[in-house]
Image (cartoon, rainbow, N blue to C red):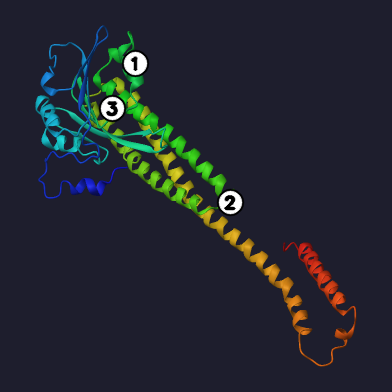
Amino acid sequence: MPNSHASRSKKNGLPPGSIVYTGENPNHEVSMTVIYYNEAVFIKEVYHSIEDFHFNQNFVGNTWINIDGISDVEYIKKIGQYFHLDNLTLEDLVNPEQRVKLEEREEYLFLILKMLTLNLITEEIEYEQLSFILENNILITFQETPKDVFDGIRYRLEADKTKIRSLSTGYLAYTLIDAIVDNYFVILDEVEKDIDNLEAKVIDKSRKEDLESILELKQSISSLKRSIAPLRELITKLQTRGMSGYFSEDMRIYLNDLYDHSIITFETVEMLNNRVHELVQLYHSTVSNDMNQIMKILAVISTIFMPLSFLTGLYGMNFKYMPELESPRGYFILLGFMVLLVFGMLFYFKKKKWI
């Protein structure tokens, strides 16, 4: 995730409502995609300049306006002026480190979620803030980059005689949120696979790099938890506040289903968090067992050499008279006895299952 401390430092000393971009993509070009739709009509328009934008207020139906890029503060300010968004809303829009939340303004519903995607090249989880402005028949979404999980929804909007074309922007907002939550399951499945792979490695043989991977995974799960944990409360608010004009009563069944999914994602991330803690303990236990095995081998070697050292020390003393030293076979007898002693001790240790 982006560095939240660095993001906050960009706004130190500024008053509330100061519209300052605090993200890490300052040079990303801003574009706007406007989709007008109803049961019979689908119109798509793309604008790269706010000056070229003209909103068709006479259109009978729904409108989805998606803004790609939030780094151009002046562009965002003009969007705010056009749709009467207050400065506190705009301030949150251009701050990608904003927490997940739902706020009801006088003329619109303001919602912030975290959209998660998996980078197939780096195999890292990428976090992006997605902001929703929901009015009666207008939905405005803001995302930092064009990458999202909404291709299936766009396809359904373009297709004739689909359910989404005949329902409100509240239903469109629900489908977008549902797509984000569904992708949480994809991300969590990948994290679980990583834990399984690491667990197999640790059981096979613990390595220092495995501990580093476990700690990275632990940090990643903590970030996931921060993004997913507030989801239940947010959807609960949607079920209550959202019904006051933004969602029809028919939407309740969908929001209830969304709430169930939010519970499952939270329980899953909690389970993964517990597993990674157990993995840390498993690593330390395996390292300890490996160390004990090494110490056992060293102890066996020391025990074997103890009587051998005694014998070599005994016959290495400088006494004038030692009968065995005068024997022509004394050296070979002692050497053979030492070899038999070694094998005898090894046999005894093996019988006792000490080795």
Instruction: Label 3: state its secondary structure.
Output: loop
Q: Residue furthest bottom?
A: 320
Pointer 2 residue: 205
Q: Is residue 56 found left or right of 115 in the rendered image?
A: left
Task: For the residues labelled 2 and 3, say whether their Cβ atoms are less than 8 Å apart.
Answer: no
Q: Which mark is residue 155?
A: 1
Quarter of the picture containing the C terminus is bottom right
Distance from disc 3 to disc 1, alpha carbons, whole Å, reads 16 Å
Report helix, strand or loop for mark 1. Answer: helix
User: Where on the picture, by quarter, is residue 188?
Assistant: top left
SS type, badge 2: loop
How far separated are the C-alphas under marks 1 and 2?
48 Å
Instruction: Give the amino acid type for the residue marked by disc 3 in the picture.
Output: Pro
212 in relation to 31, above or below:
below
| Label annotation for residue 336 | none
Dot 3, crowdedness within 10 Å: few (<14), some or many (≥20)?
A: some
Q: Residue at x 21, y 36 (%)?
A: 26
Give the labeled residue for mark 3.
Answer: 146
First in sequence: mark 3 or mark 1? 3
**As shown in the figure, which amino acid type bears the numbered disc 2?**
Lys
Name the spot of residue 239 as percent of width and height, x first.
28, 30
Identity, as a three-letter code, of the amino acid under mark 1: Tyr
Taking depth in this image into account, of 79 and 30 the one nearest to the observer is 30
* Classed neighbour count for the residue bearing mark 1: other residues with Cα under 10 Å, few (<14), some (14–19), many (≥20): few
137 up-or-down from 314: above or below: above
Pointer 2 or 3: first along the chain? 3
Examine the image and state in which quarter residue 159 appears: top left
